[in-house]
Amino acid sequence: FMNNFADSEPTPLPTLTGPVPGDTYLTRLAQGAAIALVGRVFGRATSALTHVILARFLGPQDFGLYAVGWTTLQLGGTLSVLGLDKGVIYYGLNHRNTDQHAVHSVLRQSIGLTCVLGLVLGIGLYLSAPWLATQVFGKANLTSVLYWFALAFCFFSGLRVAAADGEDVGVLV
């Protein structure tokens, strides 16, 4: 019985002072994770600060109308993406080094499809805004808020897929 590992040099163990020399994947992963973490924390903090400022300026009633519109946009944006933001990441990471053209094609098709579905949902929200505002929520003032958020559906959906690419795959960059 032979030991095939006897002649090879031992692999150095990672230390707390830095990665193993030549381990570029680990370094890139750590840098990417740090950048993503800082970006998410900054984005969430900015969003929270924006909501606090809006609440102070709008008052409780108007901020409540804004919150209903924002929540509608978030829910509709999640539906209109259809998981394509995750699909772009999965496909892009598996094929970005082998078939760059196919990755770009998948990205364009995914953004286009989500924009079209976001447009359809936005039109649906725009047309149903008076009914939603009066019959579901009992707030006639909500109609104009829903109109404005309905206009953002198309762009919001497409940007979610593009942001997923820029964050994890990097095809656009």
Image (cartoon, rainbow, N blue to C red):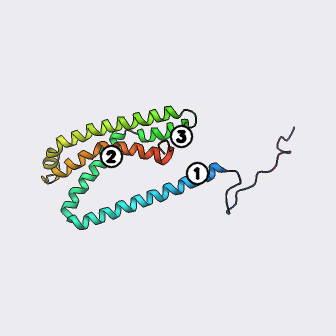
Tell me if mark 2 has few (under 14), some (14-19) or many (20+) residues whose alpha carbon lies within 10 angstroms of its own.
Answer: many
Tell which circle, 1 or 2, labels the residue nearer the N-terminal end: 1
Secondary structure of residue under mark 3: helix
Kindly identify which residue carries mark 2. Answer: 156
Which residues are drawn in magenta? 3-9
Residues under labels 2 and 3: Cα distance? 23 Å
Rendered residue at 35%/34% (across/down): 113
Tell me if mark 1 has few (under 14), some (14-19) or many (20+) residues whose alpha carbon lies within 10 angstroms of its own.
Answer: few
The picture places residue 145, in percent across and down from the top left corner, at: 19, 52
On whether residue 5 falls in the magenta region, the answer is: yes
On whether residue 143 falls in the magenta region, the answer is: no
Say above or below: 145 vs 16.
above
Secondary structure of residue under mark 1: helix
Kindly identify which residue carries mark 1. Answer: 29
Kindly identify which residue carries mark 3. Answer: 93
The picture places residue 138, in percent across and down from the top left corner, at: 13, 52
As shown in the figure, which amino acid type bears the numbered disc 3? Leu
As shown in the figure, which amino acid type bears the numbered disc 2? Phe
Tell which circle, 2 or 3, labels the residue nearer the N-terminal end: 3
